[in-house]
Amino acid sequence: SGGKSNQPEEIVTPKKKDAKKAKTTPQKKQQGSKHEVTPVSKKSSPRITPSTTPKLTMDVNVHRLRFLKLNPKSILAMASTPTCTSDKSSPSPQRLAVSREGGAVELLSPQDRWVSVGTVPGVRGRDVDALVWVCGKHGNESASGGVMMSLDYDDQSHLIQNADEQRRLFGCSRDGTIFELDFAKKRHKSVMGSGGGGVFCLASLCSRGKCCCSGGKCGGYFAAGCEDGSVRIYRASSGEEGSFPELVSTLPSAGNAILSIAWVAGQSSNDDGGMGGSVLFAGVADGTIRRYDCNTSRVLGAISTGSVLNSSKDSTSVSYRWNSTLRMTVENRGLQEATKVWALAALSDGTVVSGDSLGHVQIWDGMSGTMTQTFDHNESGADVLCLAVSD
């Protein structure tokens, strides 16, 4: 009443006063601010155009297995196929045999991205502790390598298959057996006892790539280091069913188990596969390295056991006799237990490289028996179990 309107008076709160003041008064720029934020309009945003080149896709079936528990077995031994240095055009593919814990042996192809081309299942209680290849060359395969590039795919595959069939793989075990690994039938064949207890190591002249070069024919010899301290040399059999490796020589006993062998072929002119004039080094469990020399002689009559007989045109026989000529002793550091020589490697100039249970890698002069260099393989003193050299 009294001239006043009936409309309720608007109550202005402090927040509303500030809002009205913000609408009426322009916002002042802050002095001292160096950067101004300007809004970006939608029209100025870059326009993404689809690519004209098609995307490369690959149609692959992927299978995911959650229930498969793959437990790889430990590797016990490895051996690569021998390569003859005189026949570089040989069609023989490279193969690597791998022995695993449990007795299984795999055959891998390095040039095919390490694909497995064969396998032999293990035998219960028989781990394959060492492997060795025998090339089995007959001396008439060199001509096939020269025409390898002029053959078609089927002929090349046939030559590669023949080369795989000629090369033979032998293994040994600490249960005292020596056997041949048959990848075609996936079994151990020609199983025989060593006669010297457990077998710890194997070596062949074919591994040096020279047995096929001197006489043009592989002699098929390989050596086995036995528990009784002897090194026994065998000749590979014909490979027929029921045939076994032939024992051709037994070296003088070293008195302790032979743990490693290195064999260097000789320069004999006879067609003996490098046996004549060869030198063999043996690592013994008593901490020594023994050197054995093979001497060649011709006889007219019968000869004693432990020699190899070769027939010749003049009705004489070639005798190969082994003599222990040198003994080298590795470091012991004052320990009561003897140092084990686990690994040996020999070069053609007579240099010997050894690896032992103290973690030492030592270089020796194989002619005089003098140690020229020594290295600590690791700070923890772990055993050196294998060596690889390039000669």
Image (cartoon, rainbow, N blue to C red):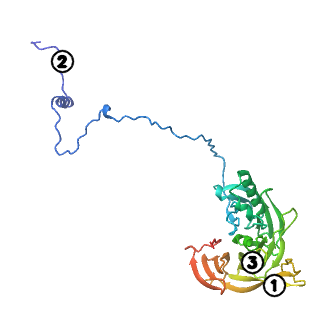
At x 70% / y 68%, what residue is drawn?
Answer: 84
Check the picture and name the quadrant holding the N terminus: top left
Residue 29 vs residue 147, the one in the foreground = 147
Residue linked to disc 2 = 8
Residue linked to disc 3 = 257
Pointer 1 local density, CA inside 10 Å: few below 14, some 14–19, many at least 20: few
Residue linked to disc 1 = 297
Q: Position of residue 119 (x, y in %)?
A: 74, 57
Q: Quadrant of residue 264?
A: bottom right
Q: Amino acid at mark 3?
A: Ala
Q: Is residue 210 visible?
A: yes
Q: Position of residue 151 (x, y in %)?
A: 71, 54
Q: Amino acid at mark 1?
A: Ser
Check the picture and name the quadrant holding the C terminus: bottom right
Circle nearer the viewer, 1 or 3: 1
Circle nearer the viewer, 2 or 1: 1
